[in-house]
Image: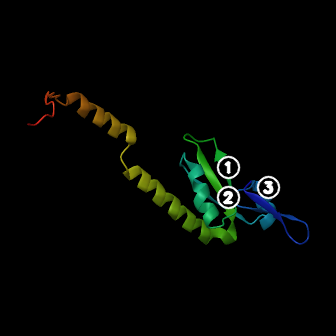
Amino acid sequence: MQGKTKNNKGKEIYKGKQSLKHLKAATNGNVESIEITDKNIRAFDCPARKYGVDYSIKKDKSVNPPRWLVFFKGKDADSLQAAFREFTAKKLKKQERPSVREQLKKFKEQAKNRVKTKTIKRDRGRDR
């Protein structure tokens, strides 16, 4: 649960990531969902908080690979689309970058294949 506050009547209001039960109670059952097949669903949390989306995430294990269902309030549809756009842009940007381990492996190979030339220069540094 991201956060909860109390309104002036003393009732708790949940914001951000929350349980499906609280989400349905806040919207009187008016909940929409979207399907995601990504493994790194936690990266979605940051853009969702940025756009103020109230959502709930459930894992559907009946299919292989498992898919994720994101439930959200019907009025948050535009905010959710903006959050997903930012989420996918970040994901694509990370995929375009080369892997650090692959770069390290390449540089190790270059270091092994490098010819070592050792020159000894003896100079006492005395000039007369």
Task: Pinpoint residue 67: horizontal percent, then vertical percent.
Answer: 58, 47
In 3D space, how far apart are the residues under numbered discs 1 and 3 (Cα atoms)?
12 Å
Task: Pinpoint residue 54: horizontal percent, then vertical percent.
Answer: 70, 63
- Secondary structure of the residue carrying tag 2 is strand
Residue at 15% across, 34% down: 125
> Label 1 belongs to which residue?
58
Q: How many marks?
A: 3
Contact, mark 1 vs mark 2 (Cβ under 8 Å): yes
Q: Write down the quadrant of residue 24 in the picture.
A: bottom right
Q: Farthest residue toward the front?
A: 128
The type of residue carrying mark 3 is Lys
First reached walking from the N terminus: tag 1 or tag 2: 1
Disc 3 crowd rating (10 Å Cα; few below 14, some 14-19, many 20+) is few
In 3D space, how far apart are the residues under numbered discs 2 and 3 (Cα atoms)?
11 Å
In 3D space, how far apart are the residues under numbered discs 1 and 2 (Cα atoms)?
8 Å
Q: Write down the quadrant of residue 74 in the picture.
A: bottom right
- Secondary structure of the residue carrying tag 3 is helix
Q: Which mark identifies residue 21? A: 3
- Secondary structure of the residue carrying tag 1 is strand
Disc 1 crowd rating (10 Å Cα; few below 14, some 14-19, many 20+) is few
Of the pair 32 and 15, the residue shown nearer to us: 15
The type of residue carrying mark 2 is Phe
First reached walking from the N terminus: tag 1 or tag 3: 3
The type of residue carrying mark 1 is Lys
